[in-house]
Image (tube, rainbow, N blue to C red):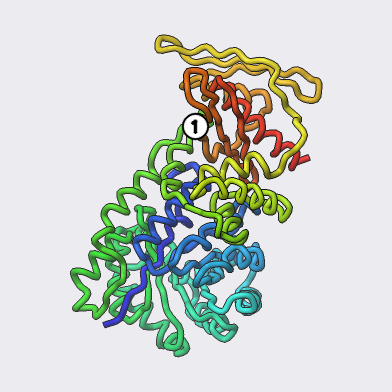
Amino acid sequence: MKTMKLIDMTLTEAGKIRESALTFKEKLEVARILDRLKVDILELPAIRSGKADQLSNKTIAAMVNIAITAQVDIIESNIEETWESIRSAKRPRLNLMAPVSPALMEYSCHKKAPAMLELIREKVKECRFYCETVEFTAVDATRAETGVLRDAVNAAIEAGAGKITLCDTAGVLLPDEFGAFIREMKEAVPALEDVQLYVQISDALHMGTACAAAAAACGIDGVKCTAVSAGYPTLEQMTKLVQVKGDVLDICCGIRSTELSRAVSQLTWLLTAREETESPFGNVAIGSAADSANVCLDINDEIGEVIKVVRQLGYDLSDEDNAKVYEAFRRVAVKKQFVGTKELDAIVASTALQVPSTYRIDNYVINSGNVITATANLLLDKNGEKLRGVGVGDGPIDAAFLAIEQIIGHHYELDDFQIQTVTEGRDAMGSALVKLRADGRVYSGNGISTDIIGASIRAYISALNKIVYEEA
């Protein structure tokens, strides 16, 4: 019985599920859930926004155990950057995406068939230089001219591609037509017998699963799907197909079907929950679930292990700052049996990237209560210039952060926010940790005060000063 591979494209197709882009923590949580589910391959989107995409790819690649494949657009040609972002994965792969239909070749690439064939050959070779396992995806294959598609697939295989994906991008074929298409391609390209053949089928006619069944009957090796409905067959549909018709089609799959329903429910909530874009706290509630698994380090852990955890928390520090963090970690670890992620966050906030204060707090007035809307009036000093901002929020801290955003004229993703006591009693000191994300990097700030709102404001300003210093 043949094992049918299920390749998950949830992260690449997230834009079809909701309008707003996934945050860094949401991407990590999606990857964690799919890793627990044991999908065969997790597909990551092509790098579009530079460092932010590279960092999320790098973090996902380092934390999951399943195979990782990253898309590479044949025109963008950021092959080396993409490879560097996933090379730490246990089983990394590059997936070169190229249109093969006349309309898409000329519209998106401005190339005729002969030039496209040469470009495919060249880029597959370049991918193969960096990565042992290379996939070639023929986009809009079902509307391509038979000769061009045959030559494109042959060129990719000859250049070193070990996996081929044929796409019914428009979803125009019925199940029997799609089965005939796969048979014709296998006859036209005998070399397909020596590589793994996948299909990517649009569900535009609501026949994606039926077309996948027809392709399975023709001996394909895998089907691309999504955990949440995004215009392709879903994991639940494909798993159900294998359960009901696996004996007939002589196929099985390795996905954990007993956990599937719960995982899909989690992903559906995560990807479709309304995002509070007006509030700095819009993404923090989702992100906090991702950090529920605390890491425990002790005095015996070497610098490499500590910095690995620091990177998993989202920080991208210099060698000098890494050394400072490890030195501070050892001082804490001598006194404590274990050092967890919260302590490590505080260590990074207080030791890494200490910079001059561009912004300073002059004064602030907070109004809040159970019968009024929380407001914050802040006056900041920026290199001698007085700047005032007023914010209205769901609570006093939310209002204060909005007032700061009004002053600086920019919204940064609030990656995490933590409050904890430092001392005991009615006059206890409170410590606040704020983590802001800018251009894919995490900057953390720490604030301490008997007034927890003041501590939170100081923590935000501390992180903001680090961003401003780096940008300058």
For this view, does 325 lie left or right of residue 65? right
Q: Which residue is mark 1?
A: 420
Question: Which element type, helix, strand or loop, lies under badge 1?
Answer: strand
- The answer to whether 347 is drawn above or below residue 263 in the figure is above
> Closest to the observer: 294 or 85?
294
Q: How many marks?
A: 1
Residue 211: which quarter of the image?
Answer: bottom left
Residue 394 at what x, y percent from top left?
46, 22
Residue at figure coordinates x 53%, y 30% from the top left: 422
Residue 218 at what x, y percent from top left?
32, 81
- The answer to whether 165 is drawn above or below residue 413 in the figure is below
- The answer to whether 182 is drawn above or below residue 346 in the figure is below
For this view, does 454 lie left or right of residue 28? right
Q: Quadrant of the N terminus?
A: bottom left
**What amino acid is labelled 1 in the image?**
Gln
Residue 430 at what x, y percent from top left?
53, 26
> Closest to the observer: 123 or 326?
326
Residue 176: which quarter of the image?
Answer: bottom left
Q: Is residue 102 visible?
A: no
**Residue located farthest toward the bottom when viewing the structure as drawn:** 190
Q: Is residue 295 visible?
A: yes
User: Are there few (<14), some (14-19), or many (20+) residues within 10 Å of tag 1?
Assistant: few
